[in-house]
Amino acid sequence: MTKAILINGSNTTFSRLTGVQQQAEKALQAQDIETEVLYVHQIPAEDLILANFGSEAVKAATAKVAEADIVVLLTPIYKASYTGILKTFLDLIPQKGFENKIIFPIAIGGSIGHLLAIDYALKPVASALGASHITHTVYVVDQQVEKLADGGYKVQEEAIARLEHQAAYIAQHSKVTVQA
């Protein structure tokens, strides 16, 4: 079965990005893609900051990336860039760690004005890690995700449709990649 790892680069699980991540998971699972979520902020901060490749938590997290066919990179956009938390984790992935994988970037930000932050900042790092198949980014504006009183999230249909469209594209192309 095709496997996807969703790497959540937020500093908390209680952010609108988690609502987007949950919708991305559903969209991939609807395409018969097995999913697992990695919350980077749950890796010990000292291991991330000191690039502790020997850390058991780092080894476990990077092994999950190595086993995946699809890597979903999720990040909020702060100060016109993806998060430092995500960057510290990406620095721990081996040089060709994204080779032969489909990379699916997803970002959320306060305005559409930060849409290109992924193209100019995150995609070059993914390429440096060996990625040759990076899908179109799904960029969600904060107002498209509502935090609910019960702790859940309501994502606008338009954003869900874009996530589902990319999941269908990924499913079609992952069959080719996995069989190759």
Image: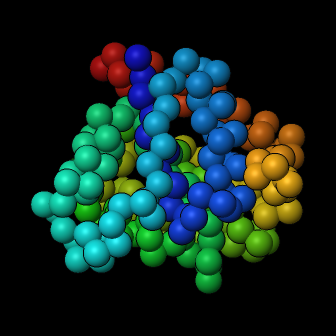
Give the answer, above or below, for where 169 lies relative to 93: above
Residue 139 makes an appearance in the image: yes
The answer to whether residue 46 is above or below residue 146 is below
In the picture as drawn, the residue positioned furthest to the left comes out as 54
Residue farthest along the bottom direction in this orientation: 79
Q: Where residue 45 sits: x, y (%)? A: 35, 72
The answer to whether residue 62 is seen in the rendering is no
> Which residue shows up at 56% across the image and 75% down it?
81
Tell whether 103 sits left or right of 79.
left
Q: Residue 125's x, y, as percent?
A: 38, 64
In this rendering, is residue 124 above or below 157?
below
The residue shown at (26%, 55%) is 57
- Residue at the spot 48% in from the left edge and 43% down from the top edge: 37
Q: Nearer the viewer, residue 177 or 155?
A: 155
In the image, 47 versus 162, the foreground residue is 47
Relative to 117, 33 lies left or right: left
